[in-house]
């Protein structure tokens, strides 16, 4: 006799430990794959799990096996043309075994592909950036929600019982359930009154009517005062905290001196600021401005991929930004953040102009302005002018960046402010 | 066996008395595709009744209903219901999970574990038809094979395996706590690599049980600690004795069970490491019969789910809809793409096994003149008995050599291709004609000989009085060389052995060539 066991409820994550072991063992490869994935993503598109692929030769489990060569005979099904003694060319692909060799896992591809969850992916992303743990936690946490009333439901916990609503429900039900008997009662009472009026109050018929009246009254009385399906509970749902909107300007120097590596660091920098902002704002607009001697608003693909040559005039970008802010993002309605990345090159005479623009036009309008100078040889004119800006403005941060781990300090200021707010 | 096998003639007028009342009122067992536990029980009863009618002898069944996630879990621990932790299972899990999520593959609808009681998993997503199919296939097909086949009877202990796996998992976890995950993982990696060489092919294993195993493990540990290992002898040997001993090899005879040799003789393994080697070796031994009987085991189970459900259908207990769904998945399972198809990846063991058991039944029931010539002893005999005999006493290799009939060779259009690297072209060695039947049968049987499929590697010598290096020998078969994984494999062997490891290939003329070396 067979025994049936329902195991559906008994734990499903038996392989979680093995999975962690796998991730730990191939950390290096996965980190590399995550880095590649990040460079392939849009700034606003970071918080997703990811399909990660690493070369399967890195993680094979070897066994002793035969190599090609020697003499072997293999039996195949489905002969349609051969007779004994036929000679045929080796099929393409060297091994010559006409389709043998697909491994049982159905791979045979060069890549081992698997999925990382969002949290795992973010962890690998953060690892390079040397974020303090508290910040990591803040970034991966789900946004805050507020409970709001959302009508009534028929099931809930006793604490949420809505008395008035339940009583109302009970009244309706009592009326409905007693309606039949009451109607009949009225009829019968009328009939009895008539009989009594005719002086036949003691007849058998009247007695019968009296009995019926009793039973009808009992029926009406039997309708329960309050029943389980009268109960109504106040219902509450989670509503994300209403937050206001923000716009983030990404400003980058695309002159000839910004190479791929610098752009990659810049991209991480933009991504990180974006991530911070998503924790505070529901809706974030992204504006990409690139510049060499002239500035231009572009879409994200152009922003990271196209490359120009020539000199650098930073003020062109600042002017353009200032104009965009005035026309499209009035500071009364928008929280404005700016992230600027550059290798520090600027036309000598332009730097004082930049300082002026920042101090007078832009900084009064924005929440936070972060500037990074990526792998610059030594500070140049722009840096010195910006140092002055920093000394007079609290919402301005700047940092020289040599590697990815230098990015985070730029935002430290931003968080300190949030903590006190 | 409790019931005498009977030929299934006229099953329609012999409905079982227990079910007779139900049959009158409601002919079909069920109509919709939804399953319930009551229905599962009902189907199981019916299938058990028919299985008993054909004399299938099984362990009691424990049928567990699980979700698809749990199925992926079960999948990735190579069918062990309890397993120690290792990254390779995680890798398997992630690969399976990904392809399942993306719809690249359906999950195998059954996993069945050779234990007593026999554990089989049903996935909750399946329809009633599929559940019935799995019950018939796993709980009566595989189950009776596990109980009856001589390899399983000799090599595996269905009573003790679950206990042993629990012991293994706890032991590995304990080692991880004491010596660190990485150290344990290294040993396991190396052992897994050598798993196929952790099998006794000729010796009979002792039966395992949890309590005994624990006690023995402690004894072994104490003993090994106290023992003076031959390899560690530090007393200066007498010159003459050394000379004499150098002549004889250690071990005196080549040993095929690499893991066993390492467990017993590796000079530098700690006792706990030896125990882990032993665990992997025991598990390899447990799975060894499955690797040797793939065609038979799957063929047997497929033959019986087909036969049992058809029997029920003939009794009028299954709807036409049920049968259509059942036949559709059955046909998928036993499809053998021809060699020129893109789907072709070798011979499908389900297809070959199923076809062979059907063919044996045909030879018994309606033998042709040719069958009488080829199989005089079984042509016209009682098919139930003949099949039972075949199931009990063969493995893939001998089963094919014994029972592959010319009729089936023609039906499958089998042909043999000879690939000799000394020739420019491939040669068709034999096809499905009079001259070829015996050749094909022998070649196909050889193809399932594990000894030919895997390189034959044995422990040849340990340099006892020198650098303690270990020499393995690869006995070449048909001049086939070792694959490119050899250097990596030698590193694994060296990690376990602790000293230099070499491997030599011996070709058929007896010439020895050093093909790999790993110096520690």
Image (cartoon, coloured by chain):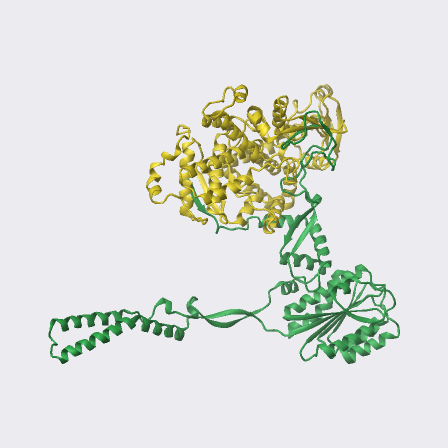
Chain colours: A green, B yellow
Q: Quadrant of residue A208?
A: bottom left
Q: Say if A238 sits above or below B486 in the image.
A: below
In the visual, does B316 lie left or right of B271?
A: left
Q: Say if B310 sits above or below B416 in the image.
A: below
Image x and y of residue B417, in percent: 68, 29
Image x and y of residue A24, in percent: 65, 50
Q: Residue at x 43, y 34 (%)?
A: B51
Image x and y of residue A238, in percent: 53, 68
- Residue B221 appears in the figure: no
Q: Looking at the picture, tell me which residue is in the foreground, A330 or B78.
A: A330
Image x and y of residue A256, in percent: 85, 63
Q: Say if B408 sits above or below A160 in the image.
A: above
Quadrant placement of the N terminus of chain B: top left
In the visual, does A58 lie left or right of B369?
A: right
- Residue B214 appears in the figure: yes
Q: Residue at x 68, y 65 (%)?
A: A44
Q: Residue at x 88, y 72 (%)?
A: A348
Quadrant placement of the C terminus of chain B: top right
Q: Residue at x 84, y 77 (%)?
A: A353
Q: Quadrant of residue A415?
A: bottom right
Q: Looking at the picture, tell me which residue is in the foreground, B503 or B434.
A: B434
Q: Looking at the picture, tell me which residue is in the foreground, B194 or B20.
A: B20
The total number of labels drawn is 0
Taking the view exactly as shown, the residue that stands out farthest to the front is A81
In the visual, does A18 lie left or right of A388?
A: left
């Amino acid at each position: 006799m067979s025994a049936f066991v329902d195991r559906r409820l008994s734990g499903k994550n038996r392989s979680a430990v093995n999975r962690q072991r796998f991730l730990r063992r191939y950390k290096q490869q996965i980190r590399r794959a995550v880095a590649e994935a990040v460079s392939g993503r849009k700034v606003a598109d970071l918080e997703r799990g990811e399909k990660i692929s690493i070369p399967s030769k890195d993680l094979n489990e070897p066994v002793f096996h035969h190599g090609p060569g020697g003499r072997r005979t293999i039996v195949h099904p489905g002969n349609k043309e051969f007779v004994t003694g036929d000679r045929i060319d080796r099929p393409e692909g060297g091994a010559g075994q006409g389709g043998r060799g697909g491994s049982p896992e159905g791979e045979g591809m060069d890549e081992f592909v698997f999925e990382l969850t969002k949290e795992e992916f973010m962890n690998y992303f953060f690892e390079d950036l040397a974020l303090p743990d508290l910040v990591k936690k803040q970034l991966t946490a789900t946004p805050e929600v507020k409970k709001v009333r959302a009508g009534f439901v028929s099931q809930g916990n006793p604490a949420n019982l809505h008395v008035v609503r339940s009583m109302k429900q009970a009244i309706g039900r009592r009326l409905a359930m007693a309606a039949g008997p009451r109607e009949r009662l009225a009829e019968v009472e009328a009939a009895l009154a008539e009989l009594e009026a005719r002086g036949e109050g003691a007849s058998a018929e009247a007695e019968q009517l009296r009995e019926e009246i009793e039973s009808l009254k009992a029926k009406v009385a039997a309708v329960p005062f309050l029943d389980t399906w009268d109960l109504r509970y106040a219902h509450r749902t989670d509503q994300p905290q209403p937050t206001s909107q923000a716009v983030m300007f990404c400003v980058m120097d695309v002159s000839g001196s910004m190479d791929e590596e610098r752009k990659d660091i810049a991209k991480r920098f933009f991504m990180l600021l974006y991530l911070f902002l998503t924790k505070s704002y529901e809706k974030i607009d992204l504006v990409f401005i690139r510049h060499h001697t002239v500035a231009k608003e572009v879409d994200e693909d152009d922003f990271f991929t196209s490359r120009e040559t020539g000199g650098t005039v930073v003020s062109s970008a600042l002017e353009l930004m200032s104009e965009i802010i005035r026309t499209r993002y009035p500071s009364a309605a928008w929280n404005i953040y700016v992230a600027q990345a550059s290798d520090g090159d600027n036309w000598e005479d332009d730097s004082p102009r930049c300082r002026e623009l920042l101090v007078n036009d832009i900084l009064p309008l924005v929440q936070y302005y972060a500037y990074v100078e990526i792998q610059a040889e030594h500070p140049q004119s722009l840096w010195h002018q910006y140092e002055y800006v920093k000394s007079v403005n609290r919402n301005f941060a700047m940092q020289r960046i040599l590697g990815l781990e230098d990015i985070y300090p730029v935002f430290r200021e931003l968080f300190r402010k949030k903590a006190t707010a | 066996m409790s019931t005498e096998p009977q030929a299934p003639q006229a099953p329609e007028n012999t409905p079982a008395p227990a079910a007779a009342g139900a049959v009158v009122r409601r002919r079909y067992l069920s109509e919709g595709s939804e399953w319930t536990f009551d229905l599962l029980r009902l189907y199981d009863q019916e299938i058990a009744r028919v299985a008993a009618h054909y004399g299938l002898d099984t362990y009691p069944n424990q049928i567990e209903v699980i979700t698809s996630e749990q199925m992926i879990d079960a999948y990735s621990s190579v069918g062990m219901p309890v397993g120690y932790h290792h990254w390779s299972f995680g890798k398997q899990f992630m690969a399976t999970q990904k392809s399942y999520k993306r719809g690249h593959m359906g999950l195998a609808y059954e996993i069945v574990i050779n234990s007593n009681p026999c554990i089989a998993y049903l996935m909750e997503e399946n329809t009633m038809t599929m559940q019935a199919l799995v019950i018939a296939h796993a709980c009566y097909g595989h189950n009776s094979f596990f109980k009856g086949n001589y390899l399983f009877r000799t090599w595996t202990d269905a009573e003790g395996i679950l206990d042993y796996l629990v012991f293994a998992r706890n032991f590995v976890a304990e080692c991880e706590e004491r010596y660190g995950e990485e150290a344990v993982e290294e040993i396991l990696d190396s052992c897994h690599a050598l798993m196929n060489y952790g099998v006794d092919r000729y010796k009979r294993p002792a039966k395992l049980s949890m309590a005994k195993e624990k006690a023995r493990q402690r004894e072994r540990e104490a003993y090994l600690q106290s023992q003076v290992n031959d390899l560690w002898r530090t007393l200066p040997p007498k010159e003459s004795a050394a000379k004499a001993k150098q002549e004889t090899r250690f071990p005196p005879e080549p040993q095929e069970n690499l893991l066993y040799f390492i467990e017993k003789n590796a000079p530098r393994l700690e006792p706990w490491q030896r125990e882990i080697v032993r665990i992997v070796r025991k598990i390899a031994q447990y799975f060894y019969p499955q690797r040797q009987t793939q065609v038979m085991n799957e063929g047997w189970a497929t033959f019986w789910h087909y036969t049992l459900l058809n029997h029920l259908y003939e009794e009028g207990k299954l709807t036409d809809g049920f049968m259509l769904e059942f036949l559709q998945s059955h046909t998928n399972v036993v499809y053998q793409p021809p060699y020129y198809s893109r789907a072709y990846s070798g011979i499908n063991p389900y297809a070959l096994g199923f076809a062979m058991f059907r063919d044996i039944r045909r030879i018994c029931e309606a033998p042709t003149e040719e069958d009488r010539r080829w199989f005089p002893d079984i042509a016209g005999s009682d098919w139930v008995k003949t099949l039972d005999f075949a199931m009990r006493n063969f493995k893939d290799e001998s089963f094919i050599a014994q029972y592959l009939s010319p009729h089936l060779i023609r039906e499958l259009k089998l042909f043999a291709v000879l690939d000799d690297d000394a020739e420019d072209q491939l040669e068709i060695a034999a096809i499905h004609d009079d001259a070829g039947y015996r050749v094909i049968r022998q070649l196909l049987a050889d193809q399932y000989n594990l000894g030919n499929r895997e390189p034959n590697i044995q422990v040849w010598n340990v340099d006892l009085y020198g650098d303690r290096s270990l020499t393995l020998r690869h006995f070449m078969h048909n001049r086939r060389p070792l694959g490119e994984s050899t250097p990596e494999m030698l590193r694994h062997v060296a990690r376990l052995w602790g000293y230099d490891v070499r491997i030599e290939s011996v070709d058929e003329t007896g010439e020895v060539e050093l093909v790999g070396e790993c110096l520690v």
